Image: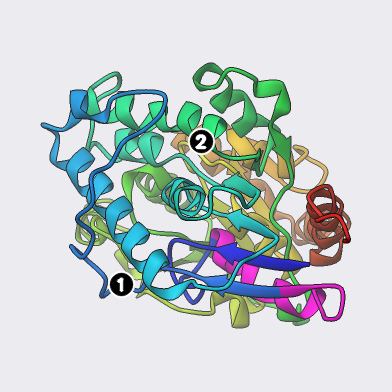
């Protein structure tokens, strides 16, 4: 079966789908499988020029928005690049971004296309303060879900909660499948260690949606309570300067280390003790599974896919989003009781191995792919 995994970002991008798809190639071996990866290079911008028409709505109603114009141009660019670079036919295409799924079905209308939706661009834009709820951009981006339902042969997403989020925007939400991201256990090597001072770590893009302002406020509360810790923030983004200034105002800058962008944080994540990320929304939250496989205790917000990964008090701790005092209470529990911290970390690791191993996800994907296997002549 000739299979194409079609991404938007090149696979070296950190997080989410890029933490899984490149590792699938070793599991889809000839002679039964031939799998290729495809993505749009960053340098391809402004190349596409053909008219864009959607089947389920008229995008020109939203074209006065620069964000909508940029999105449509990116779709044109992906179409241009696909037609230029892909010549051979495939038996099945698995797309991992809305732009990708629509472009692939436009170029290969006779080829089955499976569409995985890994996150919500519009929800991220709202939480990051870039667009307004029910504004032009929001309505355009949510209209794309019904367009994808119309064009593609099957829709998948990464958590039950995100399927619920998608439900109002499609005609048949019951047909959306759920397959979470999978992780190659060989990438994660827990390291036995004892830190005299608890080491907290978070890994994410530095944007408002991730709730790092709440985390810094919680850490200031920990300091007020006399609890020693170090907070390691791995990642970069548009609000890094704001976060550094907030850490200074809160008096915790000396306890906080900003690393910036790091390509493979899993290589040194095992040396920390507690992973914490109080996101305001999360479709899945791949970094929680990665941290669990590194045997870190997990503390996260009770939202979206995070709440599906963590059973509160069993394999991690959940707190409501935007509640720094409650977050500080949860962190105090795991900082002050190393035995409890170890128990959570061990349970979290076992849960991640059982539910999010790459082998399990590959098994699920193969069952789906074989439904589209071409008939032998």
Q: Whole-percent x and y of residue 357?
A: 81, 62
* Stretch in magenta: 16-34
The CA distance from mark 1 to mark 2 is: 24 Å
Residue pictured at 57% horizontal, 60% vertical: 17
Residue pictured at 79% horizontal, 54% vertical: 369
Magenta includes 27? yes
Residue 142's tag is none
- Residue 273 in view, yes or no: no
Residue 42's tag is 1
Q: Whole-percent x and y of residue 274?
A: 63, 61
For residue 22, above or below residue 153: below
Quarter of the N terminus within the rendering: bottom right
For residue 359, above or below residue 335: below
Q: Front-most of 354 and 196?
A: 354
Q: Whole-percent x and y of residue 96?
A: 55, 54
Q: Front-most of 324 and 107?
A: 107
Quadrant of the image occupied by residue 165 = top right
Asked if marks 1 and 2 touch (Cβ < 8 Å), the reply is no
Question: How did the renderer colour the structure?
Answer: rainbow
For residue 4, above or below residue 110: below
Secondary structure category for the residue under label 1: loop
Which residue, given by chain and number where applicable, does mark 2 sit on? 148
Judge from the rendering whether residue 219 lies leftward or rightward of residue 249; answer left or right: right
Q: Whole-percent x and y of residue 76?
A: 28, 54
Looking at the image, how many numbered discs can be counted on the residues?
2
* Label 1 or label 2, whichever comes before in sequence order: 1
- Residue 333 in view, yes or no: yes
Secondary structure category for the residue under label 2: helix
Q: Front-most of 68 and 300?
A: 68
Judge from the rendering whether residue 135 lies leftward or rightward of residue 25; answer left or right: left
């Amino acid at each position: 079966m000739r299979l194409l995994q079609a991404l938007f970002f090149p696979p070296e991008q950190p997080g989410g789908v890029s933490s899984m798809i490149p590792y699938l190639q070793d599991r889809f071996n000839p002679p039964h499988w031939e799998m290729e990866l495809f993505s749009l290079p960053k340098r391809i911008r402004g190349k596409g020029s053909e008219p864009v028409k959607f089947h389920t709505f008229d995008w020109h109603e939203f074209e006065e928005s620069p964000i909508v114009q940029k999105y449509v141009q990116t779709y044109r660019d992906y179409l241009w690049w696909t037609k230029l670079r892909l010549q051979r036919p495939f038996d099945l295409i698995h797309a991992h971004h809305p732009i990708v799924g629509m472009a692939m079905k436009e170029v290969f209308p006779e080829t089955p296309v499976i569409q995985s939706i890994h996150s919500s661009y519009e929800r991220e834009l709202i939480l990051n303060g870039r667009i307004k709820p029910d504004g032009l951009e929001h309505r355009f981006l949510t209209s794309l879900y019904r367009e994808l339902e119309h064009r593609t042969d099957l829709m998948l997403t990464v958590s039950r909660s995100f399927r619920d989020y998608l439900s109002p925007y499609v005609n048949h939400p019951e047909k959306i499948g759920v397959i979470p991201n999978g992780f190659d256990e060989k990438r994660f090597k827990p390291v036995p260690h004892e830190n005299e001072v608890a080491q907290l770590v978070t890994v994410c893009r530095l944007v408002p949606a991730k709730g790092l302002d709440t985390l810094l406020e919680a850490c200031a509360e920990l300091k007020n309570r006399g609890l020693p810790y170090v907070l390691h923030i791995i990642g970069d983004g548009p609000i890094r300067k704001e976060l550094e200034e907030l850490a200074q105002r809160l008096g915790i800058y000396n306890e906080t280390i900003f690393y910036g962008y790091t390509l493979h944080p899993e290589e040194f994540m095992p040396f920390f003790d507690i992973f914490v990320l109080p996101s305001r929304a999360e479709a899945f939250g791949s970094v929680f599974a990665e941290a669990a496989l590194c045997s870190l205790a997990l503390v996260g917000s009770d939202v979206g896919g995070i709440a599906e990964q963590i059973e509160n008090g069993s394999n991690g701790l959940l707190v409501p989003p935007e509640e720094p005092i409650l977050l500080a209470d949860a962190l105090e529990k795991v900082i002050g009781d190393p035995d409890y911290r170890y128990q959570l970390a061990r349970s979290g690791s076992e849960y991640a191995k059982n539910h999010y191993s790459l082998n399990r996800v590959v098994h699920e994907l193969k069952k789906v792919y074989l439904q589209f296997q071409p008939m032998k002549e």
